């Protein structure tokens, strides 16, 4: 399963959700690959800590190879690094991705990520892809390569307005490049159940028939502490409410996936 976490709006928790779900997947015994397509590299740093600055290979090397002919090109697996966590590997980000984007787009390398994941088929049970907060070359590459997409939603009116543009963009990707891309759900992040506006916005999305997932992620200072420590919540504080919510979210997504599979069969 290849799952991308995407929203064109920044600050909605893409890297946090991607990294924590990938860490839970690996902790549950599934061989998991995390791909960090955001040049900011938040997921990379979250998983690797300061050692992220010393990685031998990153996605910048992978995409640079796609732009330059090599007599003996490296296989996709050679750009992957092991994380400190069992069953969790990483295709790491690098700031140089920003400079490469224009060249990759002009030479139409949009399918390179999908080709790499096809090459890795069978080596991983789960693939999670973090994306930049923009509908650019890297996020389009991820949506073309993925089977499913999760949309983080921060409970404010700006996020709601951005959501409709995002749904249009997903429909365009389906129509042009990836007809099997499934919207697996909208993940409500930094939810404050005592406040009326978040409850109202979530209810309005549900009333419109949008696939809002039942598990909401609370706002907590502990997630910032886990960022600082570069340790996902399942390892940082597994008994914390937010860690339990991430686990419940993972279970809900997997249950929905099984239902969809049974229905398709």
Image (tube, rainbow, N blue to C red):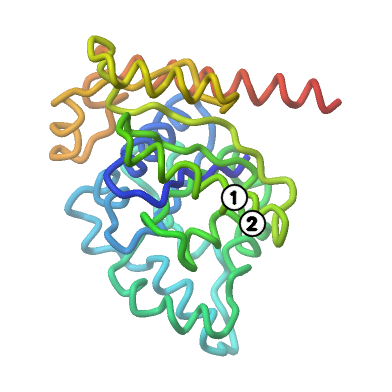
State the image quarter where residue 54 is shown.
Answer: bottom left
Residue 223 location in percent, x, y? 20, 29
User: Residue at left 26%, top 44%?
Assistant: 46
> Is 32 situated left or right of 199 in this image?
right
* Residue contact between numbered discs 2 and 1, judged by CB atoms under 8 Å: yes
- The secondary element bearing badge 2 is classed as helix
Q: Which residue, given by chain and number where applicable, does mark 1 sit on?
A: 170
> Is 108 situated left or right of 231 in this image?
right
Quadrant of the drawing holding the C terminus: top right
Q: Nearer the viewer, residue 87 or 237?
A: 237
Q: CA distance from mark 2 to mark 1?
A: 5 Å
User: Residue at left 31%, top 74%?
Assistant: 96
Q: Which residue, given by chain and number where applicable, does mark 2 sit on?
A: 173
- The secondary element bearing badge 1 is classed as helix
Residue 170 location in percent, x, y? 59, 50
State the image quarter where residue 115 is shown.
Answer: bottom right
Q: Nearer the viewer, residue 225 or 55?
A: 225
User: Residue at left 67%, top 51%?
Assistant: 121
Number of residue marks: 2
Quadrant of the drawing holding the N terminus: top right
Circle 2 packing at 10 Å, graded few (<14), some (14-19), many (20+), is some
User: Residue at left 33%, top 22%?
Assistant: 217
Mark sitting on residue 153: none
Q: Nearer the viewer, residue 28 or 113?
A: 113
Q: Residue furthest right?
A: 265
Residue 10 location in percent, x, y? 30, 49
């Amino acid at each position: 399963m290849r799952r991308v976490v995407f929203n064109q709006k920044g600050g909605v928790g893409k890297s946090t959700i991607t990294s924590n779900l990938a860490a839970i997947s690996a902790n549950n015994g599934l061989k998991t690959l995390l791909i960090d397509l955001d040049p900011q590299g938040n997921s990379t740093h979250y998983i690797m800590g300061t050692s992220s600055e010393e990685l031998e290979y990153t996605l910048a090397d992978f995409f640079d190879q796609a732009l330059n002919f090599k007599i003996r090109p490296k296989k996709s697996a050679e750009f992957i690094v092991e994380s400190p966590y069992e069953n969790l590997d990483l295709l790491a980000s690098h700031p140089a991705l920003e400079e490469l984007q224009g060249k990759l787009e002009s030479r139409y390398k949009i399918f390179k990520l999908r080709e790499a994941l096809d090459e890795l088929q069978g080596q991983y049970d789960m693939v999670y892809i973090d994306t930049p907060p923009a509908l650019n070359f890297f996020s389009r590459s991820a949506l073309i390569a993925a089977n499913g997409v999760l949309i983080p939603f921060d409970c404010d009116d700006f996020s709601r307005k951005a959501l409709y543009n995002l749904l249009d963009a997903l429909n365009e990707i389906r129509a042009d490049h990836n007809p099997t891309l499934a919207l697996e759900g909208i993940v409500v992040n930094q939810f404050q159940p005592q406040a009326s506006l978040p409850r109202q916005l979530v209810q309005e999305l549900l009333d419109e028939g949008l696939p809002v997932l039942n598990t909401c992620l609370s706002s907590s200072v502990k997630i910032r502490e886990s960022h600082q420590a570069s340790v996902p919540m399942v390892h940082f504080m597994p008994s914390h409410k937010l860690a339990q919510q991430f686990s419940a979210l993972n279970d809900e997504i997997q249950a929905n996936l099984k239902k969809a599979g049974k229905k398709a069969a």
